[in-house]
Amino acid sequence: MALYVQKFGGTSVGSVERIKAVAEKVKGFRDQGHQIVVVLSAMSGETNRLIGLANEINDEPTPREMDMLVSTGEQVTISLLAMALHKLGVPATSYTGSQVGILTDSSHTKARIQRIETDEMREDLDDNKVVVVAGFQGVDEEGNITTLGRGGSDTTGVALAAALKADECQIYTDVDGVYTTDPRVCSKAQRLDTITVEEMLELASLGSKVLQIRAVEFAGKYNVPLRVLSSFQDGPGTLIVADSDQDEDSMEEPLISGIAFTANEAKLTLLNTPDVPGVASRILGPIADANIEVDMIVQNVAPAGDYTDFTFTVAKGDYKQTMKILQEQVLPDLGEGEVKGDDNIAKVSLVGVGMRSHAGVASKMFRVLADENVNIRMVSTSEIKISVVIDEKHMELAVKALHKAFGLDKSDIESE
Ligand code: ADP
Ligand code: ASP
Ligand code: MG
C-alpha cells in the first residue's frame, strides 16, 4: 500500500465528463489499496475568466481581492470531484487550502507555503477516505486567502506530498510526460523517461510551463519522488530524479536534454548612457524598488569608452511600467541618453547537464540560428543552459531548427 498525492490540471478537470473520469481513475488506485490525496486545479480557462472579470471592473484590483476571486475556481472542482467519488461509492471530503491548513506568507498572488498541517488529512486517510484539496491556494496568518502564482497547483501537490511523506507525487496533465520541448510547438519532440531536478528547474524557469518552478524546487529540497503523467492515457510518464541518480557510466549523457522558450518577456535599452561607476545600479535600482524582476542584462562599452548601451529584459506584463520608470526617473537622473524598447521578443534556451563537459554548444547554437537567418539580440549562459533573445516571429522556427540540429527529433533517435 502506498500513499500517492495526485494532482490533476485544468484540462483534466475541464468538464463534468473529465471530472467523472478523474473519479474513476482515483477509485482505481484506491481499489488497489492505496491511500490517495487529490489536488485539483480550476477547470481550464476558469482562472483566466475570473481575472478578466476583475479587469472589467478595476484595472488595478488589490492583490488581496484578486486572491479571494481566483481561488474560487478550485473550490468548484474539488466539490464536484468529491460528489463524483461519492457517486462511485468512494468516501471523500473536499477541503480548501485554508481548511486543510496550508499556511503561507502574505505575498498575495505569489505567496510561499510556510507550513502544512497534516493531522486532519491523516485522520481522513486512516478512515479510508480520499482527501480532495484545492490547489493553488493557502491562507496567511491573519486568515486571508492567498494564491501561489499561476500554475501553483503543482506546488500544492508537491508540498502536500512532502508534508505527508508520500511515496510519489503524480502530476496528471494533458501531455504524457516532460518532452524535449513543448510538443504543441514541435511535433518531433519526444518524451523523456527521466529528467534531473536541476534540468527541470532550468526548463521551468525558462518558460516550460509543464511544471511550476516552485514545485520542482520543493521536490528537490524535500526529495519528493515526482512524476508527470497523462490523465488521458496510461503510461510511465517522466520521473524527475535527483541529480545524483543519473547513471553516468551506463549511458552517455545527452548534450542537450530540452529546449525551453517564452515570448513573455520584453527588452529595454538605454542608449548612450555615461560609462561611469554606479550607472548599472542607478538604472536598475528604481526598477528593483518597483518590485520588477529583471532577467537578462547586457552592457556594451562604446568604442570611445565614455558611453555605454545598457539592455535588460523584464516580464512583458512589467514592460510599460519599466519604460515609464526609465523615462521619468532614470533618464533625468543620468542626465543624458535615450530609451528604446521592444516587446516582440522571444527567449529560446538550450538546457542540459551534458553541456557542462562539452565546449562548442554555444557556437553550434549560433551557427544553426545564423543558417536560419535568425538574428540574435542577447545571449546569456550558465553552467547547464544557454539562452538567446531573438525576434518573436522567429521563435518557432528557431526551436524546431535547434531541436533537429541537437539530435532531439523523434525520427533521428528512433533510427539510431
Ligand atoms: P495543467 O493544466 O495540467 O497544469 P499546463 O498547461 O500547465 O497543464 O502544462 C502542460 C502543458 O505544458 C502542455 O500542454 C504543453 O503544451 C506545455 N509544455 C511546455 N513545455 C513542455 C515540455 N517540455 N514537455 C511537456 N509539456 C510542455
Ligand atoms: N488555476 C490556477 C492557474 O490557472 C492554478 C493551476 O492551475 O495550477 O494558474
Ligand atoms: Mg500547470
Image (spheres, rainbow, N blue to C red):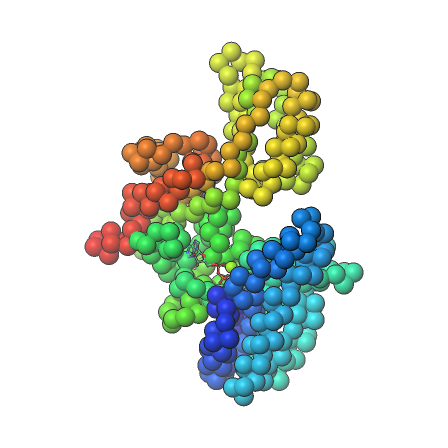
From the viewer's perspective, is residue 285 above or below residue 404?
above
Residue 401 appears in which quarter of the rendering? top left
The structure residue drawn at horizontal position 52% and vertical position 86%, both measured from the top left corner, is 88
- In the rendered image, the residue lying farthest to the right is 142
Residue 354 coordinates in the image, percent (x, y): 38, 45
Residue 97 appears in which quarter of the rendering? bottom right
Q: Is residue 253 visible?
A: no
- In the rendered image, the residue lying farthest to the left is 415
Q: Is residue 304 left or right of residue 354?
A: right
Residue 152 coordinates in the image, percent (x, y): 58, 59
From the viewer's perspective, is residue 407 above or below residue 154?
above
The structure residue drawn at horizontal position 60% and vertical position 55%, both measured from the top left corner, is 52
Residue 295 coordinates in the image, percent (x, y): 55, 38
Residue 403 coordinates in the image, percent (x, y): 33, 46
The structure residue drawn at horizontal position 51% and vertical position 19%, both measured from the top left corner, is 301
Towards the viewer: 167 or 86: 86
From the viewer's perspective, is residue 270 above or below residue 20?
above
The structure residue drawn at horizontal position 61% and vertical position 26%, both measured from the top left corner, is 280
- In the rendered image, the residue lying farthest to the top is 304
Q: Is residue 32 visible?
A: yes
Q: How many marks?
A: 0
- In the rendered image, the residue lying farthest to the bottom is 89
Q: Is residue 76 left or right of residue 373?
A: right
Q: Is residue 365 left or right of residue 20?
A: left
Residue 219 appears in which quarter of the rendering? bottom right
Towards the viewer: 85 or 415: 85
Towards the viewer: 336 or 7: 336
